Image (tube, helix red, strand yellow):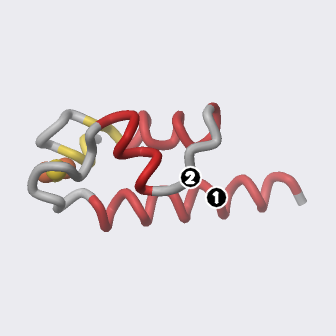
Amino acid sequence: MYVCLCHGVSDKKIRQLAIDEGITDIKGIKKCTALGTQCGKCIKPTKEILAETEYLQIKQAS
Ligand code: FES
């Protein structure tokens, strides 16, 4: 599903950046994808995806 419609960034891409590249903050995601640099509606859902991904990683590690 697309999270950032302005720049065509999907939830899959955000998770991939978080897991594979260790980019877990909005600033880093913005740098890599331009997400959130137009209307900004995608910032909140992206934060939720990052938090959920971090939670799942911690859960899997324990
Ligand atoms: S939806 Fe991401 S900047 Fe508009």
Q: Is there a contact, CB below 8 Å, between mark 1 and mark 2?
A: yes
Where 21 sits versus 40, above or below?
above
Helix, strand or loop for disc 2: loop
Q: Badge 2: few (under 14), some or many (20 or more) residues near its Cα, within 10 Å?
A: some
Is 30 placed left or right of 39 in the picture? right
Q: Residue at x 66, y 63 (%)?
A: 55
Q: Position of residue 22 (x, y in %)?
A: 64, 42
Q: Quadrant of residue 46?
A: bottom left
Residue at the right extreme, as displayed = 62
Q: Quadrant of residue 43?
A: bottom left
Q: Position of residue 6 (x, y in %)?
A: 12, 42
Residue tagged 1: 54
Marked residue nearer the N-terminal end (1 or 2): 2
Image quadrant where one finds the N terminus: top left
Q: Residue at x 55, y 62 (%)?
A: 52
Is 12 placed left or right of 2 in the picture? right
Q: CA distance from mark 1 to mark 2?
A: 8 Å
Q: Look at label 1 and name its amino acid.
A: Glu
Q: How many marks?
A: 2
Is 32 placed left or right of 59 in the picture? left
Q: Position of residue 41 (x, y in %)?
A: 17, 61
Instruction: Mark 2 and ligand 1: say if the CB distance to the nearest ligand atom is below 8 Å.
Output: no
Residue tagged 2: 24
Q: Residue at x 14, y 43 (%)?
A: 5
Q: Look at label 2 and name its amino acid.
A: Thr
Is 38 placed left or right of 9 in the picture? left
Q: Badge 1: few (under 14), some or many (20 or more) residues near its Cα, within 10 Å?
A: some
Instruction: Mark 1 and ligand 1: say if the CB distance to the nearest ligand atom is below 8 Å.
Output: no
Where 38 sits versus 13, above or below?
below
Image quadrant where one finds the C terminus: bottom right
